[in-house]
Image (cartoon, rainbow, N blue to C red):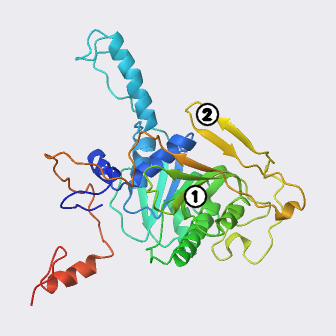
């Protein structure tokens, strides 16, 4: 997350630097957690395509340090405000026993977090980082060894102590050719899913970025082979002009006899048998008004005729309060605002070589020498 001379990027970009996040994408994971409660009972996590580390930073602060962030922090502040109102003074908040109010940290025991990316990532407290390619089969043993170094068995293809959650915010360098970009992104998701199959425990969760395009329902159908519930979410911090969204898969339940492997992803070339343990409930179209005022539409999965040809549509949810910032909007900045330095400068940006060549030619910061 670099520094702009005029700092006219979106509000989440500036807010990320003010709150100490490495990238604005941290708000996407926070808003997904607010909607789906991803971190409930979670102690072992794998973060794929992690650099520069904003999602790992969220995991470190919530799971390892025990901080309250997002809606949980808002609820905590509301409780403290009520305590302050009942206390002796509003200007000098005191607890009933006379001691200042402090944030109560709730670190979790036995937390294990592994982050993987092709690009190097600056270290984070409690995070094990690996520089590896998630599309290559050799990454599987590296991940298994990082998760359980004491009980690692090179002959095993799955984790001895499975993880609760696998997340992936990875995306290819877009070309502008939407069909090509969607295809490459689907292959990246395919690799992330196969790594998740090797380490997830039964009932585990999987969250990954997707590009919504033509025939994306085929992707949802593939995810439904191994997960009880698949939903699509669009965080408010994700620009509406972007085709990106996130699949939130819960209830991991692979078919009997299935063996995860990057050499043969999801049993490619073979037809997986029906999974009797997977609970797929048929539903009728319905409309429900939630307590927070949001209307949920269930399109239903029941249809007459041949059930094998029924097209299944994943539920779509928009995460984030409408009172939050609009990621596509431009907000006026105060006159006395000063641009902040990036929280964590890139360790090895892919454009580093291009900058070095530009400087060698006599130009820098987007300028070239006039001849």
In this view of the protein, which residue sits in the foreground, 192 or 9?
9
**Percent from the top left, x then y, of residue 301?**
78, 52
Q: CA distance from mark 1 to mark 2?
A: 46 Å
Crowding around mark 1 (Cα neighbors within 10 Å: few <14, some 14 to 19, many 20+) is few
Circle 1 sits in a helix, a strand or a loop, which is it? Answer: loop
Mark 2 crowdedness (10 Å alpha carbons): few <14, some 14-19, many ≥20: few
Q: Quadrant of the N terminus?
A: bottom left
Residue 360 seen in this snapshot: yes
Q: Which quadrant does the C terminus fall into?
A: bottom left
- Say the numbered circle drawn on residue 95: none
> Residue extending furthest left?
371
Q: Residue 86 appears at what percent x and percent y? A: 35, 10
Q: Nearer the viewer, residue 76 or 262?
A: 76
Which residue reaches farthest bottom? Answer: 371
- To which residue does mark 2 refer? 290
Task: Residue at 58%, 70% (x, y): give it.
Answer: 186
- The quadrant in which residue 294 appears is top right
Of the image marks 1 and 2, the number of the one nearer the N terminus:
1
* Depicted 88 relative to depicted 215: above or below: above
Give the left or right position of residue 64, taking residue 315 as reference. left
Secondary structure found at label 2? loop
In the rendered image, residue 121, in percent from the top left (x then y), is placed at: 36, 63
In this rendering, would 159 be left or right of 243? right
Residue 159 visible in this rendered orientation of the protein: no
| Residue under pointer 1 | 151
Q: Which of the 4 quarters of the picture holds residue 262?
A: bottom right
State which quadrant residue 270 falls in.
bottom right
Camera-nearest label, 1 or 2: 2
């Amino acid at each position: 997350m670099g520094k702009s001379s005029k700092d006219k990027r979106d509000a989440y970009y500036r807010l990320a630097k003010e709150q100490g996040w490495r990238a604005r994408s941290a708000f996407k994971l926070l808003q997904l957690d607010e909607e789906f409660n991803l971190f409930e009972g979670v102690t072992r996590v794998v973060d794929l395509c992690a650099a520069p580390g904003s999602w790992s930073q969220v995991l470190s602060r919530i799971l390892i340090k025990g901080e309250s962030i997002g809606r949980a922090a808002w609820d905590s502040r509301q409780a403290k405000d009520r305590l302050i109102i009942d206390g002796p003074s509003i200007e000098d908040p005191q607890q009933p026993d006379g001691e200042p109010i402090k944030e109560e940290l709730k670190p979790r025991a036995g937390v294990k977090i592994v982050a993987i990316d092709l690009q190097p990532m600056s270290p984070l407290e409690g995070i094990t980082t690996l520089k590896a390619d998630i599309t290559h089969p050799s990454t599987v043993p590296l991940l298994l060894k990082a998760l359980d170094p004491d009980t690692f068995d090179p002959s095993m293809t799955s984790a001895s102590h499975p993880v609760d959650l696998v997340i992936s915010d990875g995306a290819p360098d877009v070309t502008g050719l939407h069909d090509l970009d969607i295809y490459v992104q689907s292959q990246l998701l395919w690799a992330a899913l196969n790594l998740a199959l090797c380490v997830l425990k039964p009932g585990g969760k999987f969250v990954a970025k997707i590009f919504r395009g033509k025939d994306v329902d085929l992707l949802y159908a593939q995810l439904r082979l191994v997960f009880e519930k698949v939903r699509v979410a669009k965080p408010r911090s994700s620009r509406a002009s972007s085709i990106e969204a996130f699949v939130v898969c819960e209830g991991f339940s692979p078919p009997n006899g299935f063996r995860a492997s990057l050499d043969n992803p999801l049993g490619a070339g073979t037809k997986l048998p029906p999974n009797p343990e997977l609970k797929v409930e048929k539903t009728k179209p319905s409309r429900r008004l939630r307590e927070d005022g949001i209307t949920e539409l269930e399109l239903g999965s029941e249809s007459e005729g041949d059930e094998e040809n029924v097209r299944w549509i994943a539920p779509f949810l928009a995460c984030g309060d409408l009172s939050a910032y609009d990621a596509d909007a431009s907000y006026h900045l105060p006159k006395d605002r000063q641009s902040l330095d990036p929280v964590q400068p890139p360790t090895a940006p892919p454009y580093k070589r291009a900058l070095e060549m530009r400087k060698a030619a006599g130009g820098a910061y987007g300028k070239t020498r006039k001849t």
